[in-house]
Amino acid sequence: MNKILEVRGLSKTYGPGCPQCVESTGPEADTNLCPHCGSVVAIHDVSFDLFEGEILGVMGESGSGKSTVVKALYFDQVPSSGEAIFYDSDKQHELFALNAARQRWLRNHRFGMVYQNPNLGLNFNISAGGNIAERLLMSDLMDYGAIRERAKALLARTEVLLSRVDDLPKHFSGGMQQRVQIAKALATQPPLLFLDEVSTGLDLSVQARILDLILEIQQELKTAMVVVTHDLGVIRLLTGRAIVMKYGRVIETGLTDQILEDPQHAYTQRLVASAL
Amino acid sequence: MNATPLTQGGNAYNFGFLDEYAKKEVRRAVLKAIAIPGYQVPYASREMPMGRGFGTGGLQLTLALIGPDEVMKVIDQGSDDSVNAVNLRRFIEMTCPGVSTTTKTAECTLIQSRHRIPELPLTSTQIIVLQVPYPDPLVVVEPSEDKRKTMHGEADYSRLLVKLYEDIVKFDEITISHRYPTRINGHYVIDPSPIPRWDVPKLDDSAALILFGAGREKKIYAVPPHTRAEPLAFSDVPFRVEDFRDGAGQRRACARCGSVDSFLDEFVSDSGGKTYQCSDSDWCDGVEASA
């Protein structure tokens, strides 16, 4: 199997930081707030690999730093240290060493992101079709007819009514907004997709359809995905491998089945026991 | 640097109103603007004896460039006789002794214009200065200037194109009538000031130097001679200029001179009838005189 992404020692601290930050935070210290300097150690020394067509789950409670991981990889946030290598067909990109223009290029052409809050991923003041057009225009497709066709095809694929292609997403239901976001993220057929709590806050039937859609897309396009969620059901349904985070540290990693059936870390045991 | 105070005739102002240091600063900004076509160069924008928004950006460019042997033309919406043009011309005559003014496009060496480029093709010995209210084309899609600068730097204009896309979706055509975003030399997109679409093709490969001055927004930018200027459009929905055909498909002619290849202004009479006349008054005079 080909490796798509290799993340090593990814860290992000908010605040001034001090030499004691790392040792005085984490699961053992039961906090991510450094008592000495007041910095928040959002993530520290996160490492993982992602392979072609694989779905990796990142789970953990709120504030465990799981969103910060994907935000750093999608260039929404600048990490404090660490490296990530993206293997793109025959090239490889050292993500955090690239200049801003190259990062933007990768973000627009090779990555996709679906946020928990559609507000972040969509521009609510332009139509659903326009949102998808924006991403296609970013990747230098300049033909109106082709853009329009592709936008419609994507919305059809994600089960958004075609009669609503020119409506504003702010008039859509939460589930529809999420589907438009997925369509937008898929517009450039990226080999790597980040999903940040995609189904959280949606009702159960809508959740199920969104998750089905994600699985279908993964089967169809062989897109590699990093799925961030606190929902063990989502982890069980979608992912093959998972990492468990607490207070910014990876506390357990392995096959999803293994983690859910035979959790090793005390926190994971509690998490699994409380959910299942 | 020698300031040349002009005390004769009770005129205590320096030649060109601005002091020499102010002119030097503007000229430096102009050189930078020419070196990076389409890039908005910040400058100090001095206080002028008129309100910002009345052409102070263009006027500062004019006064920094003007010399005693200049032949100056000032236009406001194509006309040499409208209030803005007359006031600016008087001001230049008053503060720049020796400078001659004209209304003839063919005779002038320096043009300050508001919202039009003359119909007569400009030559390599001429410079045209355009007054700009809003220099940044991205202001409609991004409120933060910081982010706009990054977008310009990375030539990220996809959100402007989305605007065009939405226009076509809603109205089946691009509805921008003036300030049409135009890509200069393959990188920076400029707001070419409120010139009509008719004038946008004149920016491309222009023989004359085209300068843009925004006084309130404190920016100077340029389209140097013989530089590419491409209005943003889709490959299958090309840019087009205003359509002056009437209901029968006939190109409307100027009611005064009969010209059929100029930008026309529409006049509505008290009785409700519409007449069309050249917007460029010098062009109209020229065609009428030769007829």
Image: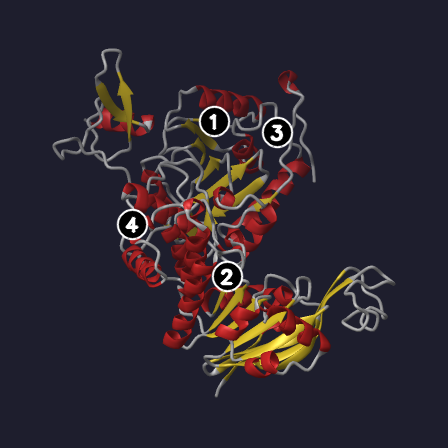
Q: CA distance from mark 2 to mark 4?
A: 24 Å
Q: Chain of mark 4?
A: A
Identify which residue is drawn at 48% across, 88% down.
A1
Circles 4 and 1 on the same subunit: no
- Give the SS element for disc 3: loop
Q: CA distance from mark 1 to mark 3?
A: 14 Å
Q: Residues within 10 Å of mark 3 (few under 14, many from 20)?
A: many
Task: Read off the residue under disc 4.
Answer: A163
- Picture layout, residue A28 above or below residue B241: below
Q: CA distance from mark 4 to mark 3?
A: 65 Å
Percent across and percent down for residue B137 are 47, 44
Task: Read off the residue under disc 3.
Answer: B15
Q: Chain of mark 2?
A: A
Circles 2 and 3 on the same subunit: no
Task: Read off the residue under disc 1.
Answer: B100
Drawn side of residue A249 relative to residue A170, left or right: right
